């Protein structure tokens, strides 16, 4: 008797499974066009419904700057205010803003042995300073959702190093995202599309400060890109400082000559 009950149960379960499968097939066949189905599901799953897929159109590295030593390969201990002399990318120029910017240096130490040469903002004693990089031939187009900045930095004290943009119209923006304090050098990246931008007021020689929030700024023609911690440095060595070993900008490029012609 028990064996008969078990056999009957198996038959019922199999019948239910066959029925459910058949019902699903029928529903799939009679579903109106444009209201689902395998093709629609596949389309919906393509890059999570985003067309085009941003990750399929990542911008290349527009430039990378890794400031070089005066005597590469030879450990030396020195400080140099001639920042352009240490640029590896000769298509770039460095621009300084603020009364303290004249004291920004390229710094190099014998110890620690693995310490790189870097841009040091700790000497901006006369007021906050901004340092930017400008490509001689191209604007940067940072409107691509995958545009980003990757950099190796080391901040001390309460320093927060933020991105600064100078747009083609001469206005400045400063990012809410930043690279914060760290005990050692660290590599971080900031995705441009995730940044909330504020106007940066540069009223030289002394006043540099953030102002109103800017909703969806036009980043298709960025004239300069750089950094600031919006803080005053101290005389001599100070533990409250920002350091930049290298910076890499992933963005599309727009020829300055082409952009000028399009505006005429």
Image (cartoon, grey):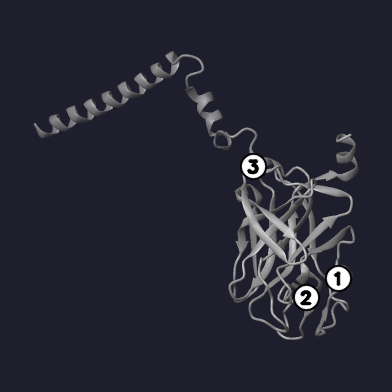
Residue at the image position 78 percent from the left and 78 percent from the top? 107
Mark 2 element type:
loop
Residue at the image position 48 percent from the left and 22 percent from the top? 37
Q: Residues within 10 Å of mark 1 (few under 14, many from 20)?
A: many
Measured in 3D between alpha carbons, the distance from the residue under mark 3 to the one under mark 2, in whole angstroms, is 36 Å
Indicate the quadrant where residue 97 lies: bottom right
Q: Is residue 88 above or below residue 32?
A: below
Image-based side of 162 in relation to 91, left or right:
left
Indicate the quadrant where residue 226 lies: bottom right
Q: Disc 3 vs disc 2: Cβ atoms closer than 8 Å?
A: no
Mark 3 element type:
loop
Q: Disc 2 vs disc 1: Cβ atoms closer than 8 Å?
A: yes
Task: Specify the label residue 45 is tagged with.
Answer: none
Q: Nearer the viewer, residue 118 or 237?
A: 237
Image-based side of 20 in relation to 202, left or right:
left
Q: Nearer the viewer, residue 212 or 110?
A: 212
Disc 1 or 3, which lies upstream in sequence?
Answer: 1
Residue at the image position 59 percent from the left and 73 percent from the top? 182
Image-based side of 174 in relation to 9, left or right:
right
Disc 2 or 1, which lies upstream in sequence?
Answer: 1
* Residue holding disc 2: 117
Q: Quadrant of the N terminus?
A: top left
* Residue 246 in the image, given as x and y percentages of width and height: 75, 66
Task: Specify the label residue 86 is tagged with.
Answer: 1
Q: Is residue 260 above or below residue 28?
A: below
Disc 3 or 2, which lies upstream in sequence?
Answer: 2
Q: Is residue 206 above or below residue 177?
A: below
- Mark 3 or 2: in front is 3
Q: Residues within 10 Å of mark 3 (few under 14, many from 20)?
A: few
* Residue holding disc 3: 216
């Amino acid at each position: 008797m028990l064996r008969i009950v078990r056999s009957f149960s198996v038959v019922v379960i199999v019948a239910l499974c066959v029925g459910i499968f058949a019902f699903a097939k029928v529903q799939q066949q009679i579903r109106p066009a444009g209201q689902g189905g395998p093709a629609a599901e596949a389309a919906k799953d393509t890059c999570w419904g985003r067309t085009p897929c941003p990750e399929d159109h990542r911008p290349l590295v527009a430039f990378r700057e890794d400031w070089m030593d005066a005597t590469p390969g030879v450990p030396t201990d020195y400080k140099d205010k001639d920042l352009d002399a240490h640029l590896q990318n000769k298509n770039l120029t460095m621009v300084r803003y603020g009364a303290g910017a004249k004291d920004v240096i390229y710094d190099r130490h014998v110890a620690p042995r693995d310490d790189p040469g870097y841009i040091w903002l700790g000497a901006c004693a006369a007021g906050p300073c901004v340092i930017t990089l400008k490509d001689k031939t191209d604007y940067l187009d940072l409107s691509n959702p995958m545009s980003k900045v990757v950099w190796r930095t080391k901040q001390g004290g309460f320093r927060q190093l933020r991105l600064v943009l100078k747009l083609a119209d001469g206005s400045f923006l400063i990012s809410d995202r930043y690279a914060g304090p760290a005990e050692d050098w660290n590599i971080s990246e900031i995705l441009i599309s995730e940044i909330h931008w504020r106007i940066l007021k540069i009223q030289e020689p002394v006043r540099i400060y953030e102002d109103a929030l800017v909703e969806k700024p036009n980043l298709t023609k960025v004239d300069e890109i750089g950094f600031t911690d919006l803080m005053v440095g101290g005389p001599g060595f100070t533990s409250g400082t920002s350091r930049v070993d290298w910076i890499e900008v992933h963005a599309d490029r727009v020829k300055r000559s082409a952009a000028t012609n399009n505006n005429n």
